Amino acid sequence: DANTSDLFIGYGMDMWYGIVDNLSFSGCSYTISKSLIFQPKDGTIVDFVYSKQDILNDIATQQAILATTGLTSRDSAKVFYQIDIWNQVLALNDSNQIHADATAASTKNFSYGSSQTYSKTVDINQSHSISVEHYVDAEAGLTGNVNIAGSGFSAGYKFTTSKRFGNTSTSGSSTSQTISYSLADDDPGDAFSVRILSDPMYGTPVFQVMPGTKSSCPYEGGIQRDQPRLEHAGTTDSLVTFPNVTVGEYQSFDLNICNDAAERRSYRLRLKNNNNNAVVTAGGNPGPEFNSVSGISLGPKGSADACTVYQVDVHQLNPNSLSFTDLEFELYDLCDDGISKSVFATINYGTMVKSITNGNWNNVTIWQAKRVPQPTDSVIIDNNHTVTIPDGPDFKCKSVIVNPNAHLVITPTGKLTVKGND
């Protein structure tokens, strides 16, 4: 994964700045102008080692800060300029990979249990610069004759410096340094073939995974050894919907859990999205994680145990929750959850009609819905309420739940038909 494998090593620091008067003579006349001076602030240098994902995460954080209200011009500028620097760093890294030097490229092969260390002297023949923008308060005393561009932020100015990286020799000759790196793997069955090139700017190694590589835990290119497959039994649709489920009852369905890899692999099943807090079990195990740390072990594709079936049961924790939309079931790799497959289920319970006081079934004022329950309704007689089925017609509903200390009374000639899911 390029977002985690690339490493960025560098530093950040704060700067002092000040304004000085310049006295310039021309013959017997002179002029006074102002100049900006700046230097690193002692004790503020901070080293960092970031992955690409770390930088992307920080950009997202900075963008969120920038979107807040009440930031001062200084704070806004600081955030804006940091985002710009990160984008330059990422663009430069992408360019260096594309233009990696293959002049002295070599290929190394290694597999599980092996560890090889190499060292080499690298030459740095190119240099590139990153523009760093700085914010200066207007109160510092800068005037229009100072060559500083407008920053776009009120009450301040911007000036730009350039930081040069790579070859710093003024004569154009290369500089050299010696670096070491190790190649190792700790996953049985992995096998790597790696071509090693040179970064044109720093001379550091650029690693390219070659065909024939098999990798896992995490997947790093080549053949992906983990191949999970998750399906609803009896359909190829990724989403199944169950309408008009009786309130208070379980809705059950089956999931086919399969391994499409050419070797035995293990995966985990979890409930990734559960709106309205449904009670969900799969294979008899409660969610959100439905199996042990060791996961579900499945044989190679085509074998008798390449697939297994888990029954899923969904139940309401709260009878007032009538819809569970897009419950997501994810089958994922044990140590690389970026390798996964998902299916979805939506469970809609029938319309619920709940009592709000005592009275006869056919009295609209005792029901929260302000109507008499219909054959498709799920009825709840709430706590401490007594509802009576009076003499007369055959009253119908889909289900009835009688809560604690509540009562359903049927008179000798009264009749109630509960239809369930028929």
Image: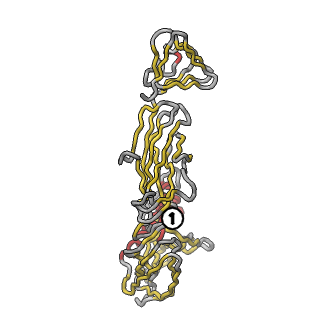
> Residue beneath label 1, please?
54
Image height of 337 relative to 392, above or below: below
Percent of width and height locating residue 116:
51, 82
Measured along the vertical axis of the image, is residue 277 above or below residue 127? above
User: How many neighbours does mark 1 have within 10 angstroms: few (below 14), some (14-19), or many (20 or more)?
Assistant: some
Q: Is residue 101 above or below residue 379?
A: below
Decide if residue 116 is in sight here. yes
Percent coordinates x, y for residue 394 in the rendering: 45, 14
Name the one closer to the observer, 185 or 409: 409
The front one of 303 and 397 is 303
Of residues 99 and 343, the one drawn nearer to the viewer in this rendering: 343
Helix, strand or loop under label 1: helix
Query: Which quadrant, please, contains the N terminus?
Result: bottom left
Residue located at (44% from left, 73% from top): 130
- The amino acid type of the residue labelled 1 equals Asp
The colour scheme applied to this rendered structure is secondary structure
**Residue 133 makes an appearance in the image:** no
Give the x, y percent position of residue 102.
37, 83
Q: Position of residue 254 (x, y in %)?
A: 45, 45
Count of residue discs = 1
* Residue at image coords 54%, 40%: 279
Q: Residue furthest front?
A: 304
Identity of the residue drawn at 43% across and 22% down: 375
**Which quadrant of the figure contains the C terminus?**
top left
Q: Nearer the viewer, residue 47 or 285?
A: 285
